[in-house]
Image (tube, rainbow, N blue to C red):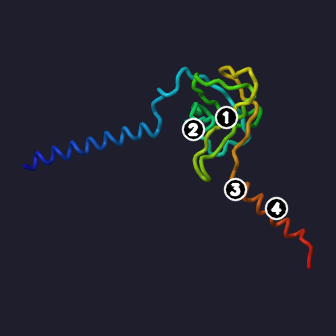
Amino acid sequence: MSRTTLDLWVGVFVAMGIAALFFLAIKVGSVSGSDIKSPYTLTARFDNIGGLKVRAPVKVAGVLVGRVSEIRYDNERFQAEVVFTVDGRYKFPTDTFANILTSGLLGEQYLGLDPGGEEKVLAPGDVIKKTQSAVVLEKLISQFMFSKAAEGETAPAK
């Protein structure tokens, strides 16, 4: 095999590797929006969104139903406003809860919806009124430490 033939095969192999990495990056990053059909937007307000990011998944019962499209700060209410897009195939009652949840102990954060029992459904552009902010691990640890310290101070002396 001559040097030019070998160089040609190495070049083809490298090009195929780059194409495979590009394809994998697109699939993992969910760049294609073809999985959401006739989307509509909803909004929810939170006191603390933690590490929630744009393009974070919106899930119901573990099923992906949409993506976070925008995060902004409301100067009048002093809250974070999360705008998200939901697949048009899914409808949710007006008493749906929006929670910011974490995948695993330290995983990525996502928006979880818990549908209620109301018969009337949310219309495009509606605001979900019932929300639960992100759980901040540092706050939980400090609350635990301070409660243990307070228990030690109030314990009767022997």
In this rendering, the label closer to the viewer, 1 or 2? 1
In this rendering, the label closer to the viewer, 1 or 3? 1
Disc 1 to disc 2, how far (Cα)?
13 Å
Q: Residues within 10 Å of mark 2 (few under 14, many from 20)?
A: some
In the structure shown, which secondary structural element does the residue marked by tag 2 occupy? loop
Disc 1 to disc 4, how far (Cα)?
32 Å
Q: In the rendering, which numbered label is found on residue 147?
A: 4
In the structure shown, which secondary structural element does the residue marked by tag 4 occupy? helix
User: Is residue 130 toward the left or the right of residue 23 in the image?
Assistant: right
Q: In the rendering, which numbered label is found on residue 113?
A: 1
The answer to the question of whether label 1 and label 4 lie on touching residues, with beta carbons closer than 8 A, is no
Q: Residues within 10 Å of mark 1 (few under 14, many from 20)?
A: many
Disc 3 to disc 2, how far (Cα)?
22 Å
Instruction: Please report the residue visible at 61 percent of the width from the left and 44 percent of the height from the top.
Output: 109
Give above or below for 140 relative to 67: below
In the structure shown, which secondary structural element does the residue marked by tag 3 occupy? helix
Of the 4 image quadrants, the one containing the C terminus is: bottom right
Answer with mark 2 or mark 4, whichever residue precedes in sequence: 2
In the structure shown, which secondary structural element does the residue marked by tag 1 occupy? strand
Q: Percent x, y for residue 149?
A: 82, 67
Answer with mark 1 or mark 3, whichever residue precedes in sequence: 1
Q: Percent x, y for residue 15?
A: 26, 41
Residue that carries the numbered disc 3 in the rendered image: 138
Q: Residues within 10 Å of mark 3 (few under 14, many from 20)?
A: few
In this rendering, the label closer to the viewer, 3 or 4? 4
Residue that carries the numbered disc 2 in the rendered image: 56
The answer to the question of whether label 3 and label 4 lie on touching residues, with beta carbons closer than 8 A, is no
Answer with mark 3 or mark 2, whichever residue precedes in sequence: 2
Answer with mark 3 or mark 4, whichever residue precedes in sequence: 3
Mark 1: amino acid:
Leu
